Amino acid sequence: MDINGASILVTGASGGLGAAMVRELAERGANLVLSARNVAVLDQLAAETGAEVVVADLANRADVERLAARAASCDVLVANAGIGSDPPLAELTSAAIDQSIEVNLRSPIVLSNAYAQARIAAGKPGQIVLIGSLSGLAASPGTRMYNATKFGLRGFALSFRQDLDGTGIGCTHVLPGFIRDAGMFADGDLDLPPGVRTKTPADVAAGVVRAISKNPAEVFVSPTELRLASTLGGLAPALSAAIQKKLGVADRV
């Protein structure tokens, strides 16, 4: 899909990665609709880009439904919003579990399904971009809910893409690795093992551009070795856990 002139809704637009996406898409001529909870940051981005603002909390189901209705008339849906920072195991509550599932998994599924149904009914093409993570490929200690929701999102994205074949609606899953300067990894101030490389918010934005323009099944935004390690983690989880234990990953989270 051509980004220039396209109407694009971006959730989680007030975060560092979301803002990088927004600015890149604006430079390419997109007409943007920005959604998040942080009104001040949304208004600042809107002033920069001429975007429309829709304030929404994706843990609130009524807000999700309202946002889905707005997305229906957009050419592209970028479901970027997410939360991480799992609490320690002893502090994990039912409320925290529910919030992770609502924001990271249920809301992008609901938005994607409603968007696709509306576009198909209107006979119009569209593109869905779901922002996942390499945490959807391999598990790590201390991130049980983030892993659970990102594993689920990847499964949904790849299956939904097949269901949409021939409808004119594309679906791409974008998988960032460790991103410096912005996003959950940067905000968490984690100590990576020696030699682990990172990418930038601009790299994630470029991945979103590729997803919209080319409609591949997946876009990886990570160094090759990290992607390979994550793939190995999915194929051999016991070996991956042993390696992470030896590297002291649990102590670094």
Image (cartoon, helix red, strand yellow):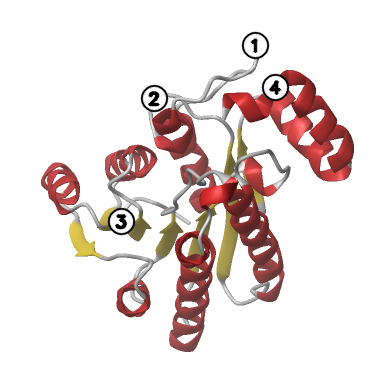
Q: Are marks 3 and 1 in contact (CB under 8 Å)?
A: no
Q: Is residue 10 above or below residue 223?
A: below
Looking at marks 1 and 4 on the same chain, the residue that comes earlier in the sequence is marked by 1
Residue 77 x/y as whole percent:
42, 63
Left or right: where 61 falls relative to 98: left
Instruction: Report the number of discs.
Output: 4
Residue 82 seen anywhere in this rendered image of the structure: yes
Per the image, the residue denoted by label 4 is 248
Q: Which mark is residue 5?
A: 3
Q: Is residue 141 above or below residue 216?
A: above
Residue 74 x/y as whole percent:
35, 69
- Residue at 79% from the left image edge and 21% from the top image edge: 246
Q: Amino acid at mark 1?
A: Pro
- Mark 4 element type: loop
- Residue at 34% from the left image edge and 37% from the top image edge: 16
Looking at marks 4 and 3 on the same chain, the residue that comes earlier in the sequence is marked by 3
- Residue at 44% from the left image edge and 32% from the top image edge: 188
Per the image, the residue denoted by label 1 is 194
Looking at marks 3 and 1 on the same chain, the residue that comes earlier in the sequence is marked by 3
In the rendered image, the residue lying farthest to the top is 194
Real-space CA distance between mark 2 and mark 3, rounded to the nearest whole angstrom: 30 Å
Looking at marks 1 and 2 on the same chain, the residue that comes earlier in the sequence is marked by 2
Left or right: where 24 falls relative to 230: left
Per the image, the residue denoted by label 2 is 181
Q: Are marks 4 and 3 in contact (CB under 8 Å)?
A: no
Left or right: where 25 falls relative to 220: left
Residue 205 x/y as whole percent:
43, 38
In the rendered image, the residue lying farthest to the bottom is 121
- Mark 2 element type: loop
Which of the two marks, 3 or 1, is nearer to us in this view? 1
Which of the two marks, 4 or 3, is nearer to us in this view? 4
Which of the two marks, 1 or 4, is nearer to us in this view? 4
